[in-house]
Each structure stands twice: as structure tokens, then as C-alpha cells.
Amino acid sequence: MPNNLIIHLDDVYKIYFEGQESEVRALQGITLKVKKGEFIAIIGKSGSGKSTAMNLIGCLDIPSRGKAYLDNQNIANLSESSLAHLRGKKIGFIFQRFNLIPSLTAKENVGLPMLFQKLSRTTRLNKASKLLNLVGLQERADHFPAQLSGGESQRVAIARSLANDPELILADEPTGNLDTKTGEQIMDLLTALNKKEGKTIIMITHDTAQAQAAERLIKLRDGQILTDE
């Protein structure tokens, strides 16, 4: 596998079984190569396989058939603990519903992923402050999620995704719960992370307008890649 690839899905199938005889082929022979530094949008309607593809790319699941590589490592060959460690170091996740912990401040939420990398509290909070500054929220560092707007909450989530300096940012419908103007601001921030910070970004979305911010657009239908432009 070339060194410039961060993700490689090789003829990947994902099959789920409902009952004893019925099977659902969520992915049907997908091959996808993602180079480091790319900004990719994966779009498709409900049932197209977007969520399943996201779970495989994010190393949250393994293929039923075929091979899935993250940074040259076949994820099916890793133990759950090794996979969790690799995922924690290599991938930052941004979710549609933000997934912030209500009882923690913005700064504490950003610092949380570093806890699992066994960094000290002082180191975590200092880095979290710098990341909040990067997304323009340094003045909201001590606010709780209930005190933040939707756009501010998503900025906190983006800062959190950068906590362990991952190579890959996986954004699942990052503007889905935001108004149009705020969504555009979030897309500008993701573009800046790609262009200025060199982060590889894979965005899962159903919004074709937002997807235009990406350099490469992949359309899924019925578990297969329809187009890759």
C-alpha cells in the first residue's frame, strides 16, 4: 500500500443478518483510496451505505469481506484494544449532534480525548485552550454546553476532534443541526483545517450544496459507489 494513502477499502462488503435467513448487504464491493491531505465528501440518500462506510473508515467496524486499511494497517487483524488506540491517535470524530458532555465545560470537553492518551490534566487543559483559540472560542472556554449556541457547540466538537492531533477528521453530517449561515461557517472552518493544517477530511452528508466544499465527491447508492469525481 502506497505511503501517501491513509485509508484503503479493498473490495469491501458489509453484510448484516436479520433473522435466520434474511441478509442486508449494506456495502457491496466498495473500493476506495484516500490520500493524505484530501478533502472528500461522501453523499447518498438514506440506505445508501453512508453510515456503514463511515463506521468502516472510522475503524468502528470491520468488513464482512474484503480488506480495510488505516495507515497501512489491516484493521481486521488488530485486537479491540489495539484498534481503539490506533483510532484514538489517527482519527478525530465530529458528530451531527455534537456529543458534548453536559457536565463538562467547553475546555474540559475538548481535553477529554487526551485523558485516554494518559496526558496530565494541566497538559490537557493547556492544549484545549489553544484548540479553542484556533476555532475562535477562547472566550467561551469555561461555559457549559447548555450555554452555547449550536454553532459554538459544533466548534467545540471540532476542537475536540483535534485533541490528539489526528491525521484524519471524520465528520458525520457536521452541519445537519445548524442553520444555513452557521453551517457555512463550519464548512469554512473545515476547509481551513484541510488547507492550512493539512488535515485529511472525510465528510458524510446528504447536503449536496455543502458537499461542494470538498475537492472530491463520492456518491453512494445501494451500497455501491455510483460516482467518484
Image (cartoon, grey):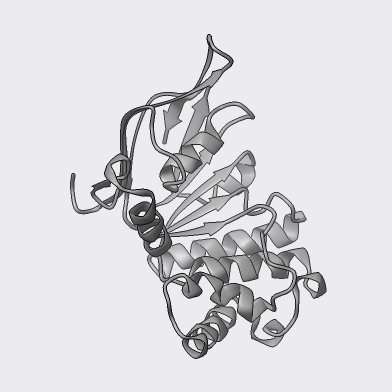
**Residue 139 shows in the view:** yes
Give the residue at x 28% y 52%: 71
In the picture, measured across the screen, residue 14 lies left or right of residue 108, that is left
* Quadrant of image for the N terminus: top left
Give the residue at x 58% y 74%: 110
In the picture, measured across the screen, residue 113 lies left or right of residue 83, that is right
Picture coordinates of residue 28 (x, y %)? 42, 21
Q: Residue furthest top?
A: 21
Picture coordinates of residue 70 (x, y %)? 31, 49
Compared to residue 210, the image places residue 217 above or below, namely above
Compared to residue 34, the image places residue 48 above or below, namely above
Give the residue at x 38% y 49%: 80
In the picture, measured across the screen, residue 33 lies left or right of residue 195, that is left
Give the residue at x 60% y 26%: 47
- Residue nearer the viewer, 204 or 214: 204
Q: Residue furthest left?
A: 2
Picture coordinates of residue 229 (x, y %)? 41, 36
Q: Residue furthest right?
A: 147
- Residue nearer the viewer, 88 or 80: 80
